[in-house]
Image (cartoon, rainbow, N blue to C red):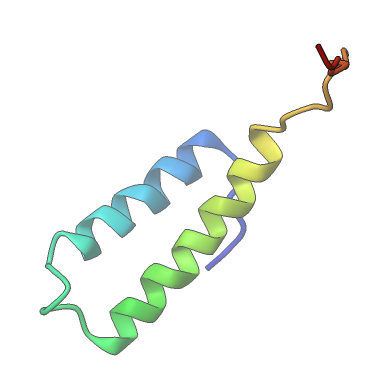
């Protein structure tokens, strides 16, 4: 599967995953399971670049009482 570079690509890949998963776990072939896994890795990589969580700008200092 090609790299996901846009929200449109992301939505298409998610729709493909949904359609494969809608078959049910007992009706998905080994090839389709591998495809789901591959597609999931593709969207995870996209999510990691799109939804970056930055480092905190403040620190908490724990004090003992």
65 shown above or below 55 = above
One can see residue 42 in this view = yes
The image quadrant that residue 48 belongs to is top right
* Residue 30, image x, y percentages: 29, 88
Horizontal side, residue 37 vs residue 50: left or right:
left
Report the side of 19 relative to 58 (left or right). Answer: left
Q: Which residue lies at the image location 84% right of the left edge and 18% below the top edge? A: 62
Eyeballing the image, is 59 above or below 41?
Answer: above
User: In the rendered image of this protein, does residue 5 appear above or below residue 25?
Assistant: above
Q: Quadrant of residue 65?
A: top right
Extreme residue toward the front, this view: 65
Identified at 52% across, 68% down, the residue is 1
Q: Work out whether residue 45 or residue 63 is closer to the camera in this orientation and state it.
A: 63
Residue 39 rendering spot, x and y as whole percentages: 46, 63
> In the displayed structure, does residue 55 sit left or right of residue 33?
right
- Quarter of the image for residue 26 reads bottom left
**Number of residue marks:** 0
- Residue at point 84%, 17% (across, down): 64
Residue 5 visible somewhere in the drawing: no
């Amino acid at each position: 599967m090609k790299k996901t570079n846009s929200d449109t690509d992301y939505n298409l890949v998610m729709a493909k995953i949904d359609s494969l998963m809608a078959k049910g776990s007992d009706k998905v072939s080994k090839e389709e399971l591998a495809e789901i896994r591959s597609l999931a890795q593709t969207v995870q990589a996209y999510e990691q670049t799109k939804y970056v969580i930055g480092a905190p700008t403040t620190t908490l200092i724990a004090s003992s009482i």
